[in-house]
Amino acid sequence: MIPNIDSPKYQGQRKFMVSKLKSLGINNKNVLNALNSVPRHLFMDPGLISHSYKNMAYPIDSGQTISQPYTVAFQTELINCKEGDEVLEIGTGSGYQAAILSYLGFDVFTIERNITLFKKSSLIFKNLSIKIKKNLLGDGYLGIADSAPFDAIIVTAAAKEIPKNLMNQLKVGGRMVIPIGEDEQIMYRFTRIEKSTFKKEEFGQFKFVPMVKGK
Ligand code: SAH
């Protein structure tokens, strides 16, 4: 049983957080509604719950982080998906980003390499009845060949270079949103215009934990 799933206090804090996201330039109504609805405090480290609705990244387990709400909203806007689209997330982490994608009615596939985080997020998805099509313990660099191609891929850890496997798992017309770089990253969106032609767009600087090869 999950105690204290939501409360007027948290709802109020979420509303305030969403108004902040709007002021920072997030304007997709569905995305704002999802961030206003999914209880981020249920994905936080228990000791940090009082910070749940601040626009900041926080430590979860195993030296990893739950992404900043602005970053979650921004990447979710950039994949530009509609209900029923198949979306692959790399780096399940706390499960918060996956829960947002699921709330939006996307078919969510997500991969995590760390077994502690994989187990934790699996339990949260189950306890909160969050629909996830497939959550896997594995190396996100490989994607999920069996379930490809995807309408979108959202990478929530910093890659050093463009993961070729993932590019090949996009549908024609599909989009991959991915931070690339070492200490700091640039957010890129690659759109597969034709089988072997990709459009590349740049969306500013971000800071993510590194994407690491292998499980
Ligand atoms: N989307 C997450 C953000 C987690 S931080 C959230 O909403 O909380 C990034 C996550 O990527 C970490 O949990 C890390 O373990 C994971 N990760 C790093 N390299 C990976 C890889 N090659 N495959 C899968 N997951 C990876």
Image (spheres, helix red, strand yellow):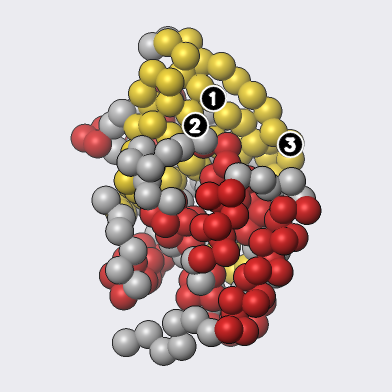
Could you tell me how far apart the alpha carbons at marks 3 and 2 are, in whole angstroms?
Answer: 15 Å
Q: Quick check: marks 1 and 2 in contact, CB under 8 Å?
A: yes
Q: CA distance from mark 1 to mark 2?
A: 5 Å
Residue 191, x across and y down, in percent: 51, 22
Which residue is pictured at 50% across the width and 42% down the height?
Answer: 155
The amino acid at mark 1 is Phe
Total numbered labels placed on residues in the image: 3
Q: Which mark is residue 204?
A: 3
Which residue type does callout 2 highlight?
Met
Quarter location, residue 76? top right
Residue 142: x %, y % from top left: 35, 36
Residue 31: percent from the left, percent from the top?
Answer: 55, 50
Q: Are marks 3 and 2 in contact (CB under 8 Å)?
A: no
Q: Distance between the Cα atoms at labels 3 and 1?
A: 14 Å
Residue at figure coordinates x 48%, y 29% from the top left: 175
> At 74% from the left edge and 46% from the top edge, which residue is drawn?
25
Q: Which residue is mark 2?
A: 176
In the displayed structure, does residue 170 sit left or right of residue 51? Answer: left
Q: Amino acid at mark 3?
A: Gly
